[in-house]
Image (tube, rainbow, N blue to C red):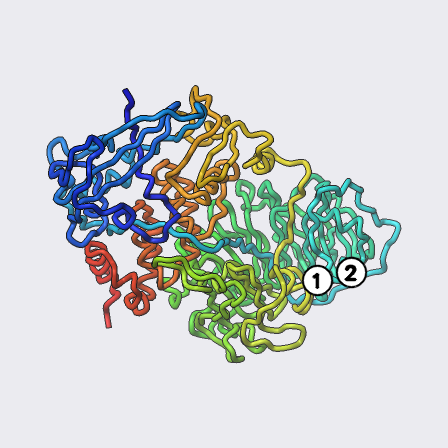
Amino acid sequence: MIRAPDVRTTSRKAGRDWGRTIVEKVATASRAPHPSGSGISKFPSLRGPQPWRRWGCPSGEPSGKRQRWTQRGRGCEVLGVHWEGRGSRRESGAGGGGRRSREEGLGAVARPLPSPRVRSFPFPSRAGHPSASRRGQAAAGGGANTSRLRAPDLAVTGDRGGDGDVTRACDEMPEKDGGGEADMSKAVKPVRATPSSLKMLDVGKWPIFSLCSEEELQLVRQACVFGSAGNEVLYTTVNDEIFVLGTNCCGCLGLGDVQSTIEPRRLDSLSGKKIACLSYGSGPHVVLATTEGEVFTWGHNAYSQLGNGTTNHGLVPCHISTNLSNKQVIEVACGSYHSLVLTSDGEVFAWGYNNSGQVGSGSTANQPIPRRVTGCLQNKTVVNIACGQMCSMAVVDTGEVYVWGYNGNGQLGLGSGGNQPTPCRIAALQGIRVQRVACGYAHTLVLTDEGQVYAWGANSYGQLGTGNKSNQSYPTPVIVEKDSSCCGQPSPSPAPAFPRGAGCSRIIEIAACHSAHTSAAKTQGGHVYMWGQCRGQSVTLPHLTHFSSTDDVFACFATPAVTWRLLSVEPDDHLTVAESLKREFDNPNTADLKFLVDGKYIYAHKVLLKIRCEHFRSSLEGNEDEIVEMSEFSYPVYRAFLEYLYTDSISLSPEEAVGLLDLATFYRENRLKKLCQQTIKQGICEENAIALLSAAVKYDAQDLEEFCFRFCVNHLTVVTQTSGFAEMDHDLLKNFISKASRVGAFKN
């Protein structure tokens, strides 16, 4: 006897057909022959899944539907038809709270298969999933869901998206302090390593690196260019050795003297330390955090910006432990003569020059040792910090921005010109969730979770990108032109769809440094824009460059030519375990399992799948099959899922990530579900906001649901004029209007 397993219908291939509901995919037949030969038109008592009732079919009772499913087992193929007729409904009440198996109402026949080693995995039962329990509760309550929105089915395809990590290494206009003649006897050549199969860090655009040989450049793994004219550099090699060269103002190279050097010299005092992040000031002084969370400082110290309790210049790196001994520092930032660090528990410590309140202590006295910045940040968790010339910024985990220090050009964004001695929230950004902040000499940029850039502060060189040179004391949106080069492909059909070019102008990275009046940004489409002071010219609107990185903007157009962050590249040799696993994904030479999806093979390793995924741990136990057929999902979606098990990351467009969200929901992969939500957020726009809100509700993605709801409220006028809003499910619309009214969306 052949038993029909618990499976989902193959007609619902997540990610394959954009925005089509199950009702649109199944064949309509008022009376069709049952597999047994009898004619069946209705099943009033059928308790099986009914997508039209759950997800907004107009009457709730469409004409008779049939869904064809296929399940391959060992040596046989089972074919069945699940009949769902007019008038059938989902029962609730005593004994009816759970969902019944799809085996109900199935007629099955079996036929032999040629290969005994080909099988299909039964898709996990929906019973017990968070989304199933939520919908079951709604059904048990009479079908009305008053607490949460509900939405139609959705799967999408489209262009690749991206994400950007913007960490800062701000620098400032340095004052000149003594130098010296080059001491050639103390120059140490870097230890040579075999550069075969190494990725080379492209540092050739910075003039200071012209002093290094081609062999030395091939060994550079991390680099930071700083100084009044970009005349100092610190870099690490593939051997984890740290080298410096340049003019060495105030001992900023950390060599123990003030002698300039035209050849690289090894920084032995930091031997064995690995750099996590680095920033520098105007003296210049240097603040460095290691991968272990330790802080080292050296260089100019006239204003106690080294945090060692003195005002003597630091000629060698000094370990700063006062008030930081039990803390792990994960980010550093420097103003002209003050320093900030961010710890792993979200606390900010500051020290140094404080004439305008930039240390955030409430006074204007210089701070000689690290002091925690409290006030409005007392019970906040900070996730990002930045420094301007004499001001400080912090972004907290709720997306709010807190600022303090000098405000003569409106760079605090508070709407006034007065200095701020303690942290103050930027009220003008209410309702906007900021992810990153970057500070120029006297201007500020922030990047929101919707990929929008806001700018304020000094604008004498057009560094705000507003099209004029007027200072702004309030956050002002920066409009980046949409890229035309990646908009040639038509949007998928049917709607909802991502508009042509909508994702291209979404910003994923912003760049500025406190020694320059230059701004830069990178779009999701990989295009880099610059504006502000660019090689002596004032560029008042974002200008599309030929660069692939914002770092190149500062190398070629900023004055001075410095790095705005620590440049970094990982070598390809001496692979870690994680890197080795990444390489083995979809490798037919080492794989012992093949997935057949849409006629294409994906190669995997059983042992890794069982280690990484609970579903595979049970389904592959004792299984000797070599080929698994998967018809529930599209090839891009299922490949992205398997790749995630190898890499802990996803490489999928925001559109296709909806299909992956469906998979993650039913496989109970909660971390994957979070990653999908983050990716989907990058592709939201007015045209698809309602569709994505619907998907978020369906798959119980609460974070994405809240994000989409806020987006819809913030763009309410445009969203309500879209076709997606016009075709919105009645229950979803009713709950959306109710929730929007509670947050004041309809106030005049």
Quadrant, the C terminus: bottom left
Image quadrant assignment for residue 521: bottom right
Residue extending furthest toward the right = 185
Marks 1 and 2 close (CB-CB < 8 Å) = yes
SS category of the residue bearing label 1: loop
Identify the residue under disc 2: 247
Q: Amino acid at mark 2?
A: Thr
Q: Earlier in the sequence, mark 1 or mark 2?
A: 1
Q: Residues within 10 Å of mark 2 (few under 14, many from 20)?
A: many
Instruction: Decide if residue 140 is in sight here.
Output: no
At which x and y percent is residue 734?
Answer: 19, 58
Which quarter of the picture shows residue 114? top left
On screen, residue 519 versus residue 39, left or right, reads right
What is the x, y in percent for residue 263?
A: 82, 54
The label on residue 491 is none
Is residue 494 depicted above or below 419 in this figure? above
The quarter of the picture where residue 390 lies is bottom right
The residue drawn where x is 15% and y is 37% is 40
Residue ID for mark 1: 227
The percent coordinates of residue 214 (x first, y second) are: 80, 52
Residue at x-position 16% and y-position 49%: 60
Instruction: Name the foreground residue: 180 vs 593.
Output: 593
User: How dense is the environment of label 1, judged by Cα within 10 Å: few (below 14), some, or many (20 and up)?
Assistant: many
Amino acid found under the numbered disc labelled 1: Gly
Q: 32 left or right of 204?
A: left
Q: Foreground residue, 685 or 316?
A: 685
Helix, strand or loop status at disc 2: loop
Horizontal arrangement in the rendering, residue 710 relative to residue 148 (left or right): right
* Residue at 81 percent of width and 57 percent of height: 211
